[in-house]
Amino acid sequence: MYPLIIFSILAIALIIERVIFWSKVQKETPIFVAEVLNTYKRKSLDAALKVCEEYKALPIARIFGAAFRLGETDEDQFRLAMESATSAEVPELRKWTTLFDTIITASPLIGLVGTITGLIKALSSINLGAVTSTSEASNVTGGIGEALIATATGITVALLTLLITNVFRSLYNRQIAIIGQYSGELEIIHRKRSEASDYAPTTPIR
């Protein structure tokens, strides 16, 4: 039971951290995207980079910021910068996934080990050659019941962790899709800015 208690506390702590992270991402990402795209359309690249700095806690802000730091570059380099930054942000978006998987897999097995050892102790106390009294029988059944608690606890810890982890996985998949969508929109804006710069008149328009 002690390893299961440790796993439970660890799972709760990691779940709280991920809930705080994803709540912030879900709440602020639409605000950031709208602001940075409008800024990049109407103002300078430096202004858009400043917006990214203001929202640097968001993965998508760090991705866009990596592209903006290249300055006025060509489309291929701009896209490559965002793709590289996206790959770098994947570990943060999938943080603690391996540990969650370990808890989900190990908890039922640890509970089963506790149940088996408890059953061995309970059954070894039975004297088959003697008449079993009512009190001895109740002690045996009580010991078996206590042994089964370990398996029930392990399965409960694994099941709850699995359900919550699946929510985090769906949020991860959704965030990757959002990053891909708005990265495409940012590339389009960058292309239009580049074309406007290439074909801009050399003399000011009066």
Image (spheres, grey):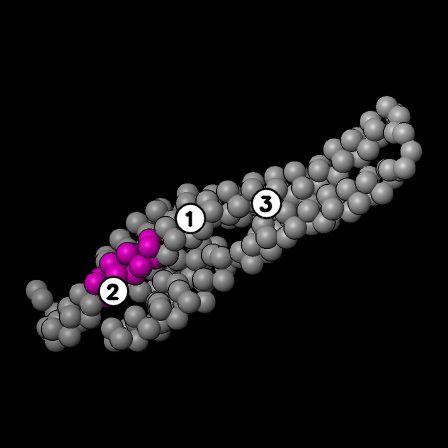
Question: Farthest residue in the top direction?
Answer: 134
Decide: few, some or many residues near mark 2? Use Cα within 10 Å; few <14, some 14-19, many ≥20: some
Kind of residue indicated by mark 1: Leu
Q: Which mark is residue 45?
A: none
Residue 193 relative to residue 64: left or right: left
Point out the stretch of residues depicted in magenta: 177-190
Q: Is residue 9 visible?
A: no
Q: Is residue 74 above or below residue 190?
A: below
Helix, strand or loop status at disc 3: helix
* Amino acid marked by disc 3: Ala
Disc 2 vs disc 1: Cβ atoms closer than 8 Å?
no
Is 196 above or below relative to 34? below
**x then y, percent, for residue 92:** 50, 59
The one of 78 and 42 positioned closer to us in this rendering = 78
- Callout 2 secondary element: helix
Q: Mark 2 = which residue?
A: 187
Give the residue pinned by disc 1.
Answer: 171
Q: For the stretch drawn in magenta, what is the main secondary structure?
A: helix
**Magenta-span inclusion, residue 40:** no
* Separation of marks 1 and 3 at Cα, in angstroms: 20 Å
Position of the N terminus, as image quadrant, is top right
Rounded to the nearest whole Å, what is the CA distance between mark 3 and mark 2?
A: 43 Å
Q: x and y percent of residue 10 in the render?
A: 66, 48
**Residue on which the image places disc 3:** 158
Number of dots carrying numbers: 3
Sequence-earlier tag: 2 or 1: 1
At 65% across and 38% down in the image, what residue appears?
152
